[in-house]
Image (spheres, grey):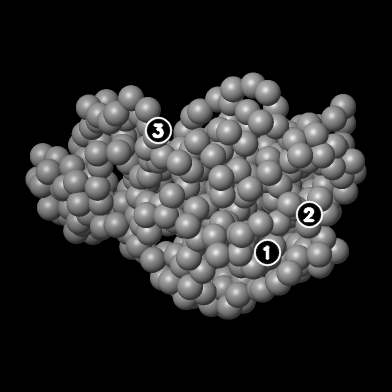
Amino acid sequence: MKQGILAAAQANEQHVVKFLRDLIAIPSTSSREEQVIYRIKEEMEKCGYDEITVDPMGNILGRIGTGKHVIAYDAHVDTVDVGNPENWTVDPFRGALKNGVVFGRGACDMKGALASIVHGGKLIKQIGIEGDFSLYVVGSVQEEDCDGLCWQYILNVDELRPEAVVITEPTNLGIYRGHRGRMEIEVRTKGISCHGSAPERGVNAIYGMAPIIQDIEQLNGRMGGEPFLGKGTVTISEIRSTSPSLCAVADSATIHLDRRLAATDTLESAVHQIQDLDSVRRAAADVAVLDYAVPSWRGLVYPTKKYYPTWLLPEDHPLLHSGLKTFRTLFDKEPTVGRWIFSTNGVAVMGMHHIPCIGFGPGNEVYAHMATEQVPVDHLVKATAWYAAFPQTYLE
């Protein structure tokens, strides 16, 4: 069976590469994924999927099989934007193929995985290795803007309830078992505006923010965590202010915090850390966790708090062992077991809903969001084989 799966994946190489290049050629930033969703639907139809659904949010769910054990593979279809075009040495929307590597926006994060999971489902049908499982191949939307939102909707509204989910973000073909969570926090100070020629008549909100900025930098150095996922972090990613004019004292100032959560952090503990800073108390500053409420490409708004919990699958969990066994059986070597630096849709699947997750995907996460974004063709082929083989191994 092993040789049959590997041979089929290798024979399918040109198809998975062409599909990936087609996906890269379709720009699909968050809330603008419509065209790429319908290109995926077309491919699933060619691959013989048993059922294909585009839900009211705009996620696409393709099903292989009708068995009682429900398994899902997730790949988000949206990408970040190109950024400065001058940083690219290739057309970001051409899907350039050079020396066995596909380049372009989304190649690594994560249209490469999407192409591989769709074709992994195809191989299951082609080789005849269906079993007592229903495999859902999910192309999810709005992840780059709000990770996990799509799966909150899938679980709560679509009412798909897998017993296991594979997050296919890039792992360099390692098996990943978690990552830190994150949240977005704003700190706001208030002032009293006056004419800039006599600043002593007012209260400058920016000056009230200055010691808070210093305290947050120092707080980052004091944060702890556990060895596998690492320590929590906090950094200021934006600062802005308001005033009646540029000739006036600022009457408000706001900083945006990117807070990465260790395994021991919670929403409440992270907020209290900021509220308890002496500078925040002295300035009587407001501390707020932000909300996300942006329409999907289908116009649906599904509001959520910008809090994305940490998740970590135990080392002895059967799902992890199934992933490891699949890799060993196919490739005759030990996989790397690791964790992502960034966060994924696992924040909703396991972080909020406690459905076990592992990670396995083609490409190296160091290329995510870069102008050198790329994925090796060899990774696409091996990932396709792993996705085809995993459900049967999981059932064992």
Residue nearer the viewer, 69 or 345: 69
Residue 359, horizontal then vertical, whole percent: 54, 41
Q: Residue at x 85, y 30 (%)?
A: 100
Q: Earlier in the sequence, mark 3 or mark 1?
A: 1
Residue nearer the viewer, 391 or 355: 391
User: Is 59 drawn above or below residue 226 in the view shown?
Assistant: below
Asked whether the residues under the numbered discs 3 and 2 touch, taking CB atoms below 8 Å apart as contact, a structural biologist would say: no
The three-letter code of the residue at mark 1 reads Gly
Q: Is residue 192 left or right of residue 131?
A: left
The three-letter code of the residue at mark 2 reads Gly
Q: Is residue 173 left or right of residue 48?
A: left
User: Is 246 drawn above or below residue 211 in the view shown?
Assistant: below
Name the residue that disc number 3 marks. 315
At mark 1, the secondary structure is loop
**Res 236 visible:** no
At mark 3, the secondary structure is loop
Label drawn at residue 279 = none
Residue 288, horizontal then vertical, whole percent: 26, 57
Residue nearer the viewer, 196 or 2: 2
Name the residue that disc number 2 marks. 128
Residue 386, horizontal then vertical, whole percent: 68, 40
The three-letter code of the residue at mark 3 reads Glu
The 10 Å Cα crowd at callout 3, few under 14, some 14 to 19, many 20 or more, is few
User: Is 102 drawn above or below residue 58 in the view shown?
Assistant: above
How far apart marks 3 and 2 lie (CA) works out to 32 Å
Label drawn at residue 65 = 1
The 10 Å Cα crowd at callout 1, few under 14, some 14 to 19, many 20 or more, is many
Q: Quadrant of the C terminus?
A: top right
